[in-house]
Structures are given as C-alpha cells and as structure tokens.
Amino acid sequence: MSESIELVRKTIAAINRRDAAAVAATLAPDVVFVDSHGKRFEGRDSLMLGWRNYFATFPDYKIEIDKEQPAVGGALVLGYASASYHGRADRAWRIPIAIRAETKDELVSLWHVFADTHLPYESMR
C-alpha cells in the first residue's frame, strides 16, 4: 500500500467522523482545496473552518471508497459521497465522487474534488 493511499484513507476516515481538527491534522499548512466547481481554498486553518461549516450543514456526510490508485505525487480515489441537509432524511443524497490528492512530506498538499453537485444543492432548497 502506498503512503499516499494510506494518508488519503486517514483523511477520509477523519471526514467520515466529521472531525474537522483531525482532517486538518492530515493537511499541509499551505494545502489547496479545489471544489467541484473549480473554486480554490487555501491553508489548513481555512479548510478546518470550511469543514466545520460543511459538517454543520451536512452532519452525516461521508465518503465511500470504491477504488484507489496511487499516482505520481499522490493518489486518485473513486467512490460516493452522501449526506442529508441538516440531517433530514427527506433531503438526503448520494453522488459519485472522484478525488485527486497530492501529498508531500506525509501531508495532503492538494485535495481536488470532482462531482456533480446538483443533488446536494437541490437538497438545500
């Protein structure tokens, strides 16, 4: 198992526990997060706050891993993301997701998400 895959699994496990501090502990200080719309967020502290806010909106958010592939400088992950808006079963969704993670010095330096976010946005209406 590659070190990058292990680190991505550790990050996803922290996400699935909805533990923003544990997610942040896997991130480089200058980490870059690119969402599925191409918007960039930078810095560990900024991302920890972002994850806290996301978990408040989607308190049961989780990522399921179907496939993992080591890549030069990181890893690729395919699977599903699911949650419900404010925990409401009538506003639940599950979507395919791909994540490209780059790692450096045993920390995540890039987390790039690819997903169709139509259902999550619809759940918030």
Image (cartoon, rainbow, N blue to C red):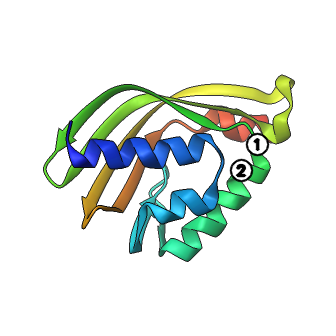
- Crowding around mark 2 (Cα neighbors within 10 Å: few <14, some 14 to 19, many 20+) is many
User: Looking at the picture, how far across and down is residue 51, in whole percent?
Assistant: 63, 58
What residue is drawn where x is 68% and y is 27%? 93
User: Looking at the picture, how far across and down is residue 36, in whole percent?
Assistant: 48, 48
Which amino acid is tagged 2?
Answer: Phe
Which image quarter is the C terminus in? top right
The part of the image, by quadrant, that contains residue 34 is: bottom left
Dot label at residue 77: none
* Residue wearing tag 1: 59
Above-or-below relation of 91 to 114: above
Which amino acid is tagged 1?
Answer: Pro
* Residue wearing tag 2: 55
User: Looking at the picture, how far across and down is residue 43, in whole percent?
Assistant: 47, 75
Q: Are marks 1 and 2 in contact (CB under 8 Å)?
A: yes
Q: CA distance from mark 1 to mark 2?
A: 5 Å
Nearer the observer, 82 or 1: 1
